Amino acid sequence: MVGDKMDLSNKEEPLPPGSSLFEILHRTTLVFLEEMMDQLDRWTYERRFHSYRVSVLALEVGKRMSLPSHRLMTLRAGALLHDIGKVRIDQEILNKPGPLDVVEWKAMKEHPAHGSAILSRIPTLAFAKDVVYQHHERWNGTGYPHGLKESEILIESRIFGVVDSYDAMVSRRSYNIPQSHGEALDEIGQNKRVLFDPDVVDAFLGIPKRFFEQLESLQSHTRFIQDSFDPQEYLALLIPLGQHSEEK
């Protein structure tokens, strides 16, 4: 995962003449993702590396739970894009150093719906919209936006809920003091069958500590998005979209 210092200019080599439609769609999607990560960098306290870390952790949990390849890609994309809806939230709310008031919290809780709405307008990323929409739902029904519980929540969103909570616990944000890795794991374990799917918790707690330690190297990984969207795996998700269009 270790690479050169992050280059946020994201300069792309031009596509060669005669590139296929899929190659053009794939490149367009990567450019859009880079632009959205840049926007989140400017707009939120967390910056892109939070999205990178939870994407890697979610994928590892998904593999340990033997999710099929298309669901792993959906999980990875949903985790990477989970906060995209925050670009529609007032920056003062996002970066407020203290607790949010009732009105501010109501606005903050709209970001999953905003994110899903954004992705639903982009055919090449719409496959991840439901993961984004449900990423704050919780096992016992206390999450939002709809208070879904247990198997009503997509497995991808159940996985994401665990890894996102862990990363929030161990990371410095505008509103918290970071916990240690061990303290965060204890809290995740205590919420097994409460906030979190017990099978997801078991898979997450089975990840060795050295895996978590290598996450810091993502800050210098210059091709994270490109490497996350393998062309062949991505194409497999888009083929049904093309078939549906042809049927029309």
Image (cartoon, helix red, strand yellow):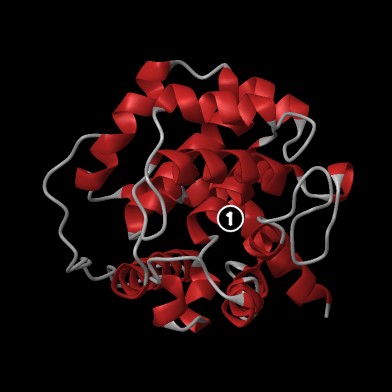
Q: Amino acid at mark 1?
A: Gly
Residue under the image location 30 percent in, 28 percent down: 214
The picture places residue 177, in percent across and down from the top left corner, at 37, 45
The picture places residue 243, in percent across and down from the top left corner, at 75, 66
Picture layout, residue 191 above or below residue 221? above
| Quadrant including the C terminus | bottom right
Please identify the quarter of the rendering in which residue 237 is found: bottom right
> Quick one: label 1, few (<14), some, or many (20+) residues within 10 Å?
many
Is residue 63 visible in the rendered image? The answer is: no
The picture places residue 176, in percent across and down from the top left corner, at 41, 51
Please identify the quarter of the rendering in which residue 244 is found: bottom right
Is residue 74 visible in the rendered image? The answer is: yes
Picture layout, residue 32 above or below residue 8? below
Picture layout, residue 63 above or below residue 132? above
Comparing 73 with 158, the one in front is 158
Q: Which residue is mark 1?
A: 78
Q: Secondary structure at mark 1?
A: helix
Residue under the image location 68 percent in, 74 percent down: 113
Total tally of numbered discs in the picture: 1
The picture places residue 25, in percent across and down from the top left corner, at 48, 70
| Quadrant including the N terminus | top left
Comparing 175 with 237, the one in front is 175
Picture layout, residue 135 above or below residue 16? above
Residue under the image location 78 percent in, 36 percent down: 194
Left or right of 25? Residue 68 is: right
Comparing 218 with 125, the one in front is 218
